[in-house]
Image: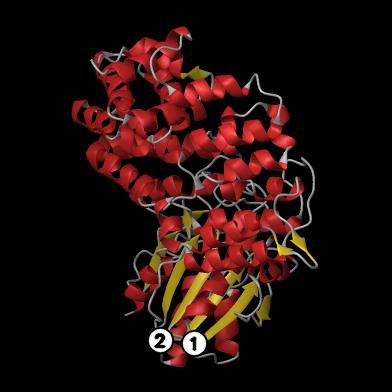
């Protein structure tokens, strides 16, 4: 029959859409499907859009997401607020900024119920002054300062215990063109609590009355020239780094004092700094310094990592930067301490909740095409999608018995990955692999050719596939019939676009957004 040649239904060039399948053109000129609006909302909340992707600029991508957020707000605004709170509170996302932006849109553009739900959620999503300033900035342009908004911001201040409030006022004084002074003058919180009133008075008038121990210490520090005296004052009053005069920040005694009460996120962010100034060091005879030991203890405390909402990607980014030996913004260099590298490696694995081994045969398809290098993960500097995919390969390797790792662009590169190797080494190996065009069907075709028995294919990709003579969904269909295994296809989105290669009509496929600590569990649940 000539027709089967004229319209082949098992092999369609990726430059053409599958017949009658509802595909649309992706950014690379190939064809795939769009995820639905709610999945797109999740992609935004978790992956963000601040750096764009290899194909789409940050502005264009953000505009597309904002449009989608507004559409879902119109569909069901309260559900959007719930989703935002969940993403922000549970530590699903490496960064909180997309959640704040979406909350501001809900508080400004939703119906009455949505707006009040969004304002009620304010302290749950905006947990620091910096978060609140970012929220105020977006709202200011969209809705102005009505009664509901003023009341919500006033409550944000009033609901905090005074010691936490004082710490927050010292730590986050002004950002994004907004300060606590601006917000207090607009929101006018009313209280009979003398301590709270003294704090507000200091912020608004600069006048110190009452106890205000931390603020008095911060002001006193500006007059002190002696380093050990300054260090004592910092320790005694648990001052944060933001309260320290800049010229003091080159002293290792000052950092040692800061480290005593440093929040975990700040510890992770300042590992390079603390090594550079000589606080974190390893001596041939003296071994690890006390501060190195302290950091090891901190990072081994997995409960603490979870409470601080340290995202695995945050740990990975820290490891990546620390191993590099210089900051991404180019301020100085350091010689990494081996024990710190090791404990970061440990912390990365620990940041994934212990998922039970799935007991299934997995083929991992790790997209290492050029676009994966050009797309950063959730706007984390220095961390591209290719490296993150490598890290996930190690997570699967660590929890599962039978994993085949296939890196691919338009070719396939089988990888031997061993759990014994340290994360940054594997990630760097992957960073040297591939770099070409994209054929997401390639790992599946490879498994057909080599007769690899797999219960599931897990593809880490931006779904911008365009090369090759067969669509991924046709390849999985062929795999199932040739191998006689009803293999599942799981697609993990690494970029916050609308694209997916997972056929929405196929119940054996799953779309996952990003790679937070729950991904192994979600995959286990789906496969069992
Ligand atoms: Ca690509």
Tell me the quarter of the picture where residue 218 sits: top right
Counting from the top left corner in percent of width and height, residue 319 is at: 64, 58
CA separation, marks 2 and 1?
A: 7 Å
Compared with 357, 28 (above or below) is above
Q: Position of residue 471 (x, y in %)?
A: 53, 70
Residue position marked by numbered label 1 in the rendering: 401
Answer left or right for 245 relative to 39.
Answer: right
Along the line of sight, which residue is nearer the eye, 386 or 188? Answer: 188
Q: How many marks?
A: 2
**Residue at the spot 79% in from the left edge and 43% down from the top edge:** 332
* Residue 131 visible somewhere in the drawing: yes
Q: Position of residue 245 (x, y in %)?
A: 66, 26
- Disc 2 is placed on an element classified as loop
The residue carrying mark 2 is 359
Q: Which residue is at a point 52% across and 58% down the rendered structure image?
A: 298
Q: Secondary structure at mark 1?
A: loop
Ligand 1's quadrant is bottom right
| Front residue of this view, candidates 289 and 382 | 289
Structure colour scheme: secondary structure
């Amino acid at each position: 029959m000539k027709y089967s040649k004229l319209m082949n239904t098992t092999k369609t060039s990726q430059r053409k859409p599958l017949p009658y399948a509802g595909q649309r053109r992706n950014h690379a000129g190939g064809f795939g499907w769009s995820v639905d609006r709610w999945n797109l909302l999740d992609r935004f909340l978790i992956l963000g859009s601040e750096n764009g992707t290899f194909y789409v600029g940050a502005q264009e991508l953000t505009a597309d997401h904002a449009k989608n957020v507004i559409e879902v707000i119109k569909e069901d605004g309260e559900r959007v607020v719930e989703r935002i709170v969940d993403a922000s509170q549970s530590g699903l996302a490496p960064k909180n900024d997309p959640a704040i932006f979406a909350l501001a849109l809900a508080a400004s553009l939703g119906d009455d119920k949505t707006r009040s739900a969004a304002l009620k959620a304010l302290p749950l999503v905006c947990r620091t002054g910096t978060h609140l300033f970012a929220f105020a900035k977006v709202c200011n342009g969209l809705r102005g300062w009505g009664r509901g908004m003023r009341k919500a911001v006033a409550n944000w201040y009033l609901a905090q215990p005074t010691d936490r409030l004082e710490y927050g006022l010292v730590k986050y004084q002004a950002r994004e063109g907004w300060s606590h002074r601006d917000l207090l003058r607009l929101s006018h919180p009313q209280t009979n609590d003398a301590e709270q009133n003294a704090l507000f008075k200091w912020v608004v008038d600069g006048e110190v009355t009452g106890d205000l121990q931390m603020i008095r210490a911060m002001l006193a520090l500006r007059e002190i020239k002696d380093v050990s005296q300054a260090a004592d004052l910092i320790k005694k009053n648990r001052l944060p780094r933001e309260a320290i005069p800049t010229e003091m920040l080159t002293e290792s005694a000052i950092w040692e004092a800061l480290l005593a009460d440093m929040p975990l996120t700040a510890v992770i962010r300042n590992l390079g700094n603390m090594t550079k100034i000589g606080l974190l060091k390893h001596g041939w005879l003296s071994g690890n310094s006390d501060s190195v030991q302290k950091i090891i203890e901190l990072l081994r405390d997995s409960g603490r990592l979870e409470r601080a909402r340290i995202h695995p990607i945050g740990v990975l980014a820290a490891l990546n930067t620390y191993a590099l030996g210089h900051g991404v913004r180019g301020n100085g260099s350091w010689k990494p301490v081996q024990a710190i590298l090791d404990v970061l490696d440990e912390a990365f694995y620990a940041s994934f909740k212990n998922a039970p081994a799935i007991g299934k045969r997995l083929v991992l398809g790790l997209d290492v095409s050029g676009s994966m290098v050009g797309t950063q993960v959730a706007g984390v500097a220095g961390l591209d999608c290719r490296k993150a995919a490598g890290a996930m390969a190690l997570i699967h390797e660590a929890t599962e018995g039978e994993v085949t790792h296939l890196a691919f662009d338009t070719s396939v590169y089988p990888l031997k990955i061993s759990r014994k190797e340290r994360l940054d080494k594997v990630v760097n190996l992957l960073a040297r692999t591939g770099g070409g065009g994209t054929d997401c069907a390639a790992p599946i075709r490879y498994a057909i050719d080599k007769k690899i028995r797999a219960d599931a294919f897990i593809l880490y990709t931006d779904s911008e596939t365009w090369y090759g003579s067969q669509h991924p969904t046709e390849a999985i269909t062929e795999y199932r019939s040739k191998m006689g295994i009803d293999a599942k296809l799981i697609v993990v989105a690494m970029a916050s676009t609308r694209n997916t290669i997972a056929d929405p009509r196929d119940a054996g496929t799953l779309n996952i957004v990003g790679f937070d600590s729950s991904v192994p569990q979600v995959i286990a649940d789906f496969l069992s």
